[in-house]
Amino acid sequence: KPLVFSGVQPTGNLHLGNYLGAIKKFVALQDSNDCIYCVVDLHALTAQLVHQDMKSQIRSITAAFLASGIDPQKHIVFNQSAVPQHAELAWIFNCVARIGWMERMTQFKDKTGSKNAEQVSLGLLAYPSLMAADILVYRATHVPVGDDQKQHLELARDIAMKFNLDFADLIRANGTGVDIKVGDEPVHAYFPMVEPLIDGPAPRVMSLKDGTKKMSKSDASDLSRINLMDDAETIAKKIRKAKTDPDALPSEVAGLAGRPEADNLIGIFAALAEKTKAEVLSEFGGQQFSVFKPALIELAVDKLAPVNGEMRRLMDDPGHIDDVLRDGGARARVLAEKTMNEVRDIIGFVK
Ligand code: AQP
């Protein structure tokens, strides 16, 4: 079975983008894969060091995983800091990767903006290296993420490839590698090439206020996003106020070009209803937003209310959530240690 890994940061309220771009896909992948889902708490320190509510944020993301239908017994759910091998491999990857690779990341550029180097943590620059370690410490091959993470996953492939090539002779001598093909090139690899799983009708959910901007936790306007913890009335208000254009909906997907807000709302509907955009437009093509929006409200409330209710119920019992994380952490450590043991051998550390 392919091994799937993905993570979500415990920073702020989860929104519909996190749900459709990541968590809903995590749930769907459980049937035919072994899955490891992680609350990446070490990543939460990169943009902001001190979090007064770190514990409750970690529990809230875990509750969202469980409430959405992730099975922590069949799969592994844990928080990253419980498995120190992530940080150990990240250090090695810091020495494999080049500073220039990190500086080219658009998320790093977006998050640093006009700040100078004195105001930005070294961790924010090294973030993709820790992300590569999160995945590769399990030698996972499939990573469900939103479109915003595509560049980081390409970097994870570059780091894996450079490690494989730099240590090629030592990997061969150690006998832990496998022959793979990268394009037409045969490579004797220790780390696999990860495959991003980004497909689906809403790989990048956009702001409800501006169809050209990503829906994001850090947007100052709460009206720009639907939070998983929003009640039905709030969801309805936000969709009613969502920006649209004056035209009727097109009957074909091509007609969404140049209409980012319409495209976004149709994508959200399609992802929630588990349909394609074409199927949604065959139902609503030619209709006004005044007809479409109430249908979207009904669907969003219908799909999110059970997740919301179950999250609240789980959050009332933090002891149970902590047990789930402790059990997942123990199982993850066994897998991660196996990899690190081999990596230490390949590098030649005395044990
Ligand atoms: N708008 C989005 N559409 C689709 N997928 C999204 N993801 C995030 N935003 C969208 C996906 O959610 C997963 C978890 O993301 P994260 O924990 O790394 O959080 P983030 O990307 O930092 O979330 P935000 O809301 O975008 O935070 P800020 O405001 O800090 O930038 C990932 O798979 C991500 O792709």
Image (cartoon, rainbow, N blue to C red):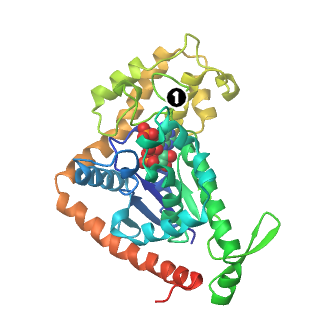
Left or right of residue 314: residue 246: right
Q: Position of residue 64 (x, y in %)?
A: 33, 50
Q: Toward the viewer: 36 or 43? A: 43
- From where the camera sits, is residue 272 visible? no
Q: Position of residue 245 (x, y in %)?
A: 55, 14
Q: Is residue 312 above or below residue 194?
A: above
Tell me what residue is drawn at x 49 percent, y 65 percent.
90
Left or right of residue 319: residue 102: right
- From where the camera sits, is residue 129 visible? yes
Tell me what residue is drawn at x 28 percent, y 49 percent.
57
Q: Position of residue 72 (x, y in %)?
A: 35, 65
Under mark 1, the amino acid is Lys
Tell me what residue is drawn at x 51 percent, y 31 percent.
206
Q: Toward the viewer: 300 or 342? A: 342
In the displayed orientation, state which residue is furthest to the front.
Answer: 118
Q: Is residue 130 above or below residue 186?
A: above
Quadrant of the rendered image containing residue 84: bottom left
Q: Is mark 1 within 8 Å of ligand 1?
A: no
Q: Is residue 157 above or below residue 296?
A: below
Q: Which residue is mark 1?
A: 213
